[in-house]
Amino acid sequence: MKKSIFKDKYPVYTLELDKSEVKLQNIDDIVDYFKAKVEAHPIAKFIAIFDHYAHTSSLPEHSIADEIKDVKNVIFCFGKEIPNTKVAAVRPRSVAICELQDKWIIEFIEAPNEALNNVMEEWSKALAS
């Protein structure tokens, strides 16, 4: 995974996988994969699937890069404590699954908890067959 800074402030982790590297055949299969990972995790709580592509394309004025074929987010929370009010601002988590013609791009914003960030990295990397 590569870490980059988006818009000079958001730490984003990105994994690009050629479609030939992934056994799952479509975006819904990958969404289901991440949903199952969340549901199997001892402290994670699944919240929703957001069809980002459908939402954006339904707007009267929208812009979607030509290479993007589909985008969905798996939304969940790892929260097992609320030590202060600020932690609520960085929750819940979201993993974005982006489909391009020949590759999948998996992205998420860095979690404030390094161990849980590592969990999201492991889930993402395990997609490669």
Image (cartoon, grey):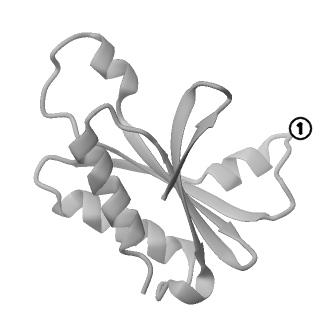
Q: Which residue does the image show at 21% across and 11% down from the upper left?
A: 84
Q: Quadrant of the C terminus?
A: bottom left
In-image side of 100 versus 38 (left or right) = right
Dot 1 amino acid type: Glu
Q: Nearer the viewer, residue 57 or 115?
A: 115
Is disc 1 placed on a helix, strand or loop?
loop
Instruction: Indicate the position of residue 25 as horizontal and vertical percent values.
Output: 54, 86
Instruction: Indicate the position of residue 83 as horizontal and vertical percent values.
Output: 15, 16
Instruction: Indicate the position of residue 21 as horizontal and vertical percent values.
Output: 53, 85
In-image side of 48 versus 11 (left or right) = left
Toward the top, the furthest residue is 85
Above or below — where is 22 with respect to 36? below
Q: Nearer the viewer, residue 27 or 114?
A: 114
Above or below — where is 75 with respect to 67? above
Instruction: Indicate the position of residue 50 as horizontal and vertical percent values.
Output: 52, 50
The number of discs equals 1
Q: Which residue does the image show at 68% across and 29% down from the upper left?
A: 7
Above or below — where is 125 with respect to 65? below
Estimate how packed mark 1 is, as few (under 14), some (14 to 19) or many (20 or more) residues with alpha carbons within 10 Å.
few
Q: Mark 1 highlights which residue?
A: 61
In-image side of 16 versus 101 (left or right) = left
Examine the image and state in which quarter residue 26 appears.
bottom right
Q: Which residue does the image show at 63% across and 50% down from the upper left?
A: 52
Q: Which residue does the image show at 58% across and 25% down from the upper left?
A: 9
Above or below — where is 40 with respect to 2? below
